[in-house]
Amino acid sequence: MALQNYNSEDKVLLAVDCIIFGFDGKDLKILLIKRDFEPKRGSWSLIGGFLKKEENLDAAAIRILHHLTGLHNIYMEQLYAFSKVDRDPAERTISVAYYALIDIASHDADLIQLDTAQWFSLHDAPDLIFDHDDMVNRALARLRRRALSKPIGFELLPTKFTMRQLQKLYEAILDKKLDKRNFINKFNSLGILEKLDEKDMTASRKGAFLFQFDADKYNAKVEEGFSFKL
Amino acid sequence: MALQNYNSEDKVLLAVDCIIFGFDGKDLKILLIKRDFEPKRGSWSLIGGFLKKEENLDAAAIRILHHLTGLHNIYMEQLYAFSKVDRDPAERTISVAYYALIDIASHDADLIQLDTAQWFSLHDAPDLIFDHDDMVNRALARLRRRALSKPIGFELLPTKFTMRQLQKLYEAILDKKLDKRNFINKFNSLGILEKLDEKDMTASRKGAFLFQFDADKYNAKVEEGFSFKL
DNA sequence: TCAAAAGTGTTCACCGTACACCCATGG
DNA sequence: CCATGGGTGTACGGTGAACACTTTTGA
């Protein structure tokens, strides 16, 4: 049995690649970098790095994301381990992909510093190196499923948002039009949003009320056996 | 950026551990082995092995499963990468867990050869080494979700089975009683089972009709936009 | 006064769920 | 003839989906 002798086993490089999703009010976007090193210098890729001996995978993903964006407390989830033998031509490397959700608007400034990083709408993103396109597709599929069963969408929005913004976000994630009344009724009936007195006046003359996600209400409901379903 | 120099990066051992589920007609079971080597000789653990340079993770999982069970074409899915720094006291090892579904009855003989392997009901399984209990719990959660959205349950049954067996299986997976009529009506309305002329006479005097899963019907329905929901 | 987005309810079809009795057979 | 598991249908409530008009206000 293989386990009997650790010493004779092959060791590999373990990479962590991050699919970073953002939302600009209209399109779902991903953050990519143009590689300024070999292999594949000049190609677009996900951001990534290698696992270090003294950290676990979550920590590596947090480190890599923080390094690029300067942000802490980012919503993040392990996605899948990609292991095709020749996926990285330079050396045998297994990559564990993570996907992350961040609010573009509130962090744009931090990211601008990095001239090699750029947001792309999913529709017109360039081809990526290695198997990174597979990673993006799998992340997207996961995001869609999650968005229907967990209130993770709020990670992509400012803390205060209008119902219209929330709807647009779900339309972008699910890639289909939703009915305004049904959407709002559904969310209101969940009882996890707090309606504020403020209005957002930027998008219309009438102004739209702002809401915010109430994590306490949500957690309380979950305790009672409530489960989020869009 | 870390990627700039592959050579300076830490390499790690990459293990593959398999959570093998079976069903004996009553309980959901997992297959465990008693370790006859260090570390933790004599403890129970999942079966596992190490990734080799010339194979990807799926291939490694298939190889390891085949080695233990002698079976090919096992339903299998990558679950999660476990990476706590000290999870294996002997050496820094990351483990990618896979879960597999097999039909106990038709393969019992193959497994009997291995006196160190044994089926345990989930309720009275022993504590496992390292983080293997976490792996089992995560696999179980995944299995429950999958069973509601994909017809994977059939992997755990003989090709021919009675409605009662199918119901017992779902009751075991979901760990709750289901209503006989509703369950059968639901499955029949899906139109993915073929009712055979044969009866199973082992469990009752009257005998129960046998069914089998019809993958062609299922695939045809999926093409039409049908999605399996229990 | 008008253009542009915000806000608001009802109806209907379908699905999930609860529920109880007769049937066939071997011993 | 009876004990055991097999097989069957209906009624109700709740949820998802379709659908159109009025309100506000700045230009």
Image (cartoon, coloured by chain):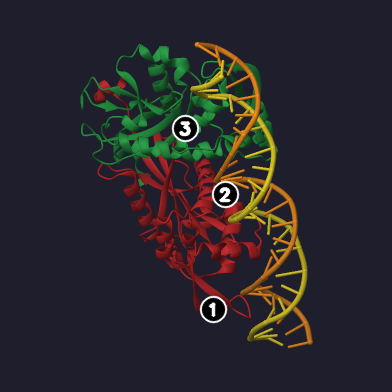
Chain colours: A red, B green, C orange, D yellow
- Point out which mark residue A199 bears: 1
Q: Do the residues bearing badges 1 and 2 touch, measured as CB atoms within 8 Å?
A: no
Q: Position of residue A37 (x, y in %)?
A: 42, 46
Element at label 1: strand
Inter-mark Cα distance, 2 to 3: 30 Å
Chain name for mark 2 = A
Q: Nearer the viewer, residue B121 or C24?
A: C24
In the image, residue A193 above or below residue B133: below
Crowding at dot 1, Cα within 10 Å, few <14 / some 14-19 / many 20+, comes out as some
Q: Mark 3 is on which residue type?
A: Glu
Residue B178 at x, y = what percent?
51, 38
Q: Is residue A51 left or right of residue A202?
A: left
Under circle 2, the secondary element is loop
Q: Chain of mark 1?
A: A
* Horizontal relation, residue B204 to residue B22: left or right: right
Would you call the spot at circle 3 few (<14 residues within 10 Å), some (14-19), or many (20 or more)?
A: some
Residue B108: x %, y % from top left:
42, 15
Q: Amino acid at mark 1?
A: Lys
B13 left or right of B90 in image: right
Label 1 in the same subunit as label 2: yes
Q: What's the amino acid at mark 2?
A: Pro
Q: In whole angstroms, how far apart are the C-alphas of marks 1 and 3? A: 48 Å
Q: Which residue is painted at 25% across and 44% down in the image?
A: A54
Under circle 3, the secondary element is strand
Parent chain of label 3? B
Q: Residue at x 44, y 61 (%)?
A: A218
Residue at horizontal 40%, vertical 47%? A48
Quarter of the image with the C terminus of chain A in it? bottom right
Nearer-N-terminus badge (1/2) = 2
Q: Which residue is mark 2?
A: A126
Q: Is residue A91 visible?
A: no
